[in-house]
Amino acid sequence: MEREWNILVINLGSTSSKVAYCRNDKIIEQIELTHDTKELRELRTHESIVAFYRKIVEDFLSGIGCSVADMDAIAARGIGKWGSYRHGAYLLTPQVGDDCRKGTMGHQGLYASTVISDEFSREYGVPAYL
């Protein structure tokens, strides 16, 4: 019997955000939220941006009765330190998460996706990938 992999997928953006729970290659649950650009412009600090987006992910998980602890992996559309990474998939290590926080924010959603995935990975011991 094939092992079932539970994967949290995070794709946060400036006009919309998508979050999904997948089992292997099948989407089990997903949401797509459209953002009010005025509301996003009012988020002035890195902390407020991360808190705004993190609530989206946590509300999604709560709504489907899951926790990050139930996941085998996190897949995020995110960023590393500007200019340091080529295209491809990367394990989001603590160093990559720290590099992201040290650089200029750039795209709010990509920044938040990376930081939130790093926080979840550290809090729950679930590997995260960019």
Image (tube, rainbow, N blue to C red):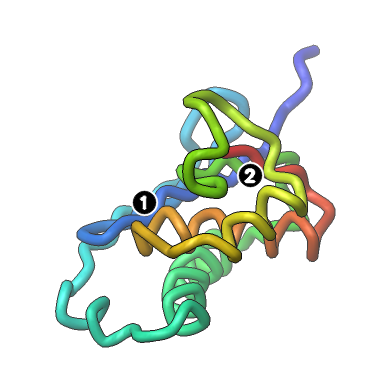
| 79 versus 16 height, above or below | above
User: Residue 117 vs residue 3: left or right?
Assistant: left
Q: Where is residue 53 in the image (x, y as percent from the top left)?
A: 44, 70
| Image quadrant assignment for residue 33 | bottom left
Secondary structure of residue under mark 2: strand
The residue positioned 52% from the left and 81% from the top of the image is 47
Amino acid type indicated by mark 2: Ile
**Label disc, if present, on residue 18 of the rendered structure:** 1
Q: In this view, does 7 lie above or below 103?
A: above
Q: Residues within 10 Å of mark 1 (few under 14, many from 20)?
A: some
Quarter the C terminus occupies: top right
Q: Residue furthest front?
A: 83
Residue 64: image location, x then y, percent:
54, 59
Disc 2 residue crowd, few under 14, some 14–19, many 20+, Cα 10 Å: many
Q: Residue at x 41, y 48 (%)?
A: 11
* Quadrant showing the N terminus: top right
Of 67 and 43, nearer the camera is 43
Q: Residue at horizontal 26%, vertical 77%?
A: 40
Furthest-right residue in view? 125
Whether residues under marks 1 and 2 lie with C-beta atoms below 8 angstroms apart, the answer is no
Question: Mark 1 to mark 2: distance in Å?
Answer: 13 Å
Q: What residue is pinned by disc 2?
A: 74
What's the amino acid at mark 1?
A: Lys
Image position, residue 72 (x, y; %):
75, 40
Q: Which residue is drawn at 78% across and 48% down?
A: 126
